[in-house]
Image (cartoon, grey):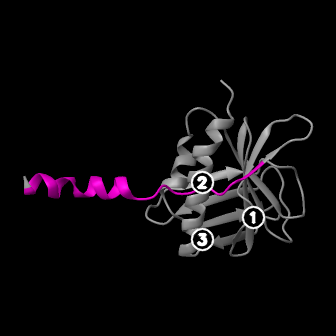
Amino acid sequence: MLLSMLLMLPVLAKAQAPEQECKLLNEKDPYTKETKLSSGALALQGAVLTVDADKKEIDFFFELKGRCFNDMSTAVIHYETTKVKTTWRNAGSMNCEGYFHFKFRNGATTPTALSRLETQKVSQFVFKGSDDKEVIVTLTPAQQQALQDVVGCMNREAKGLVTP
């Protein structure tokens, strides 16, 4: 009996752990009346990240001051515990304001690359602009956790925006 109780201890401890509270901004478009979720600005080392979601997509929007990006610009995501990298091309317009987007389709299932952002800590983002110079944005442990929390929250809440 004692042995079975000890084996159940991890399950009971997890069951009593409080659910991560989502703090997303919820706004309605005044014209289309569609709901849009936003993480608000997340400050990183040398960049600002905002994650937005609507019924069609989840958009990762980076602002890196003084950089130019075009449709051939890339962002490479490096993870802390693995050598696996993910490369994304700029999904936004050509600009010299430092705006870089990569997007995921919002649907009933979560794309694998988006799940990886939730389950693995990101050590750095490496952006290559239209001038082929790299900008490295390294995340502190607190920023890594904040990013995981935002992505996890967005993954859960954005599914509610998808119309069946």
Mark found first going from the N terminus, 1 or 3: 1
Residue 75: give x, y in percent of width and height: 68, 58
Q: CA distance from mark 1 to mark 3?
A: 12 Å
Mark 1, secondary structure of its residue: loop
Q: Considering only vertical position in the picture, is 145 above or below 159?
A: below
Residue under pointer 1: 41
Residue 39: give x, y in percent of width and height: 70, 57
Q: Are marks 2 and 3 in contact (CB under 8 Å)?
A: no
Instruction: Look at 89% across and 64% down and name the residue there.
Output: 97
Q: Amino acid at mark 3?
A: Gln
Local crowd at mark 3 within 10 Å, few (<14), some, or many (≥20)?
some
The magenta-colored residue range is: 2-26
Residue under pointer 2: 151
Instruction: Look at 53% across and 43% down and name the residue there.
Output: 112
Local crowd at mark 2 within 10 Å, few (<14), some, or many (≥20)?
many
User: In the rendering, which numbered label is found on residue 108?
Assistant: none
Mark found first going from the N terminus, 1 or 2: 1
Compared across the picture, whether 156 is left or right of 163 comes to left
Q: Quadrant of residue 68?
A: bottom right
